[in-house]
Structure formats: C-alpha cells, structure tokens
Amino acid sequence: MKEEKLHENRIVIGKIIAPHGVRGLVKIRSFCEPGELLLKLKLELENYELIELKKQGVCKEGFICTIKSVHDRNQAELLIGKDIYTNRSNLPATEEEEFYINDVVGCRVFENDQEVGKIISVHNFGAGDILEIKLENDIFYFPFKQSIFPKIDIVNKIVEFIKPEL
C-alpha cells in the first residue's frame, strides 16, 4: 500500500526524445527549472524501472546522456518518447506563489465566477505548456498563459479562465 502511494506522487520531469550516436546515448528534454535538476534526482520510467542518467553534453533540446542499462542505438531507440518520472518528495519545496505544473491537473476552471470545467492534463510538445481542459462535454486545449489563466489557486484547486478571442 505504501508503494502504491509513492507511485501516485510521481511527477513527469523529463522526456527521452531521441537517440544520439551509435553507443546508446540519448537526448533528454528536462521539464525542471533549472534543467540540470533532473540529473540530480532519483528517476524512473513509466513502468517504474529505475534509471541512472549521466550527462555527456548538451544539445538544443536539452542534454545528451548515458543511461546505465543502455549500450547501443537499438536500445536507445526503444526509449524514444518515454517520460521520465520522479517522486514528488524528491523535488525541492516551492516558494509562495509558486507551484509545480502538475499541480494544476484536477483544478476546477472558473469563468466569470462560474465553474465551467476541469483541467485534466498538461502537455508540452516543445513550444510551451498546453492545458487540456474538459469544458462541458468537450475537450479543449489552451496555451498555459497568464492572459488566459490570470489567477491560479493551487491550495483550493481553482483556476480562473478567460476564453481567448478567436
């Protein structure tokens, strides 16, 4: 049961985005601030397999790393697109008015003081964070910008929403 609780507190903090060379190196995109924080934490893949990263260099997308159990390009290619997780307890505490992006998942969305939906996921395809929101019976995607989400109350799980003009 305690093990299950630990897994509920996992946070995606990076992604394996491509192989690099023929010796099993991979390109890693870090979702941490600062980015190098990812390299200092206890990490696992989505199947709970522990992984050890060692930085070998930097690239436009993030870092070039070795993974202890990966020794050739074929093994590295099998990991493309895999999320990298850590347990929330491994992360530093946030400052006041600061939160982890995953904290908005599950927040109720209010427009003009009326509840209109719920945030169900956060995505980042390389151009910034996008919130996936269920509004009424449809799913919508909005860029996570202050002009669209001016107030975020993580404690009460409430997000103010201003629908962008089309």
Image (cartoon, rainbow, N blue to C red):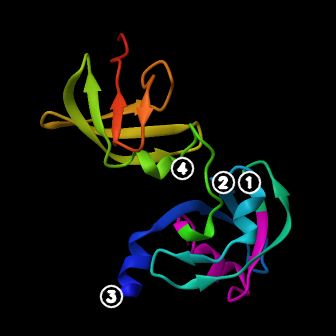
Residue position marked by numbered label 4 in the rendering: 100
Residue 29: image location, x then y, percent = 66, 56
Of the residues shown, which amino acid type is indicated by label 2? Cys
143 and 57: which is toward the camera: 143
Task: In the rendered view, tell whether residue 152 sits above or below residue 50.
Answer: above
Pick the front one: 152 or 76:
152
Q: Which mark is residue 1?
A: 3
Residue 127's x, y, as percent?
Answer: 58, 36
Say whether marks 1 and 2 touch (CB < 8 Å): yes
| Residue at mark 4 to residue at mark 3: CA–CA distance | 25 Å
Residue 66 image-quadrant placement:
bottom right
Mark 4 residue type: Tyr
Q: Residue tagged by mark 1? A: 35
Where 49 sits versus 12, above or below?
Answer: below
Q: Nearer the viewer, mark 2 or mark 3?
A: 3
| Residue at (42, 21) in percent of width and height | 148
Which residue shows up at 59% across the image and 60% down it?
Answer: 13
**At 34% from the left edge and 43% from the top edge, which residue is drawn?**
157
Check the image and report above or below for 91 versus 127: below
Pinpoint residue 152: horizontal percent, then vertical percent.
Answer: 43, 33
Above or below residue 91? Residue 158 is: above
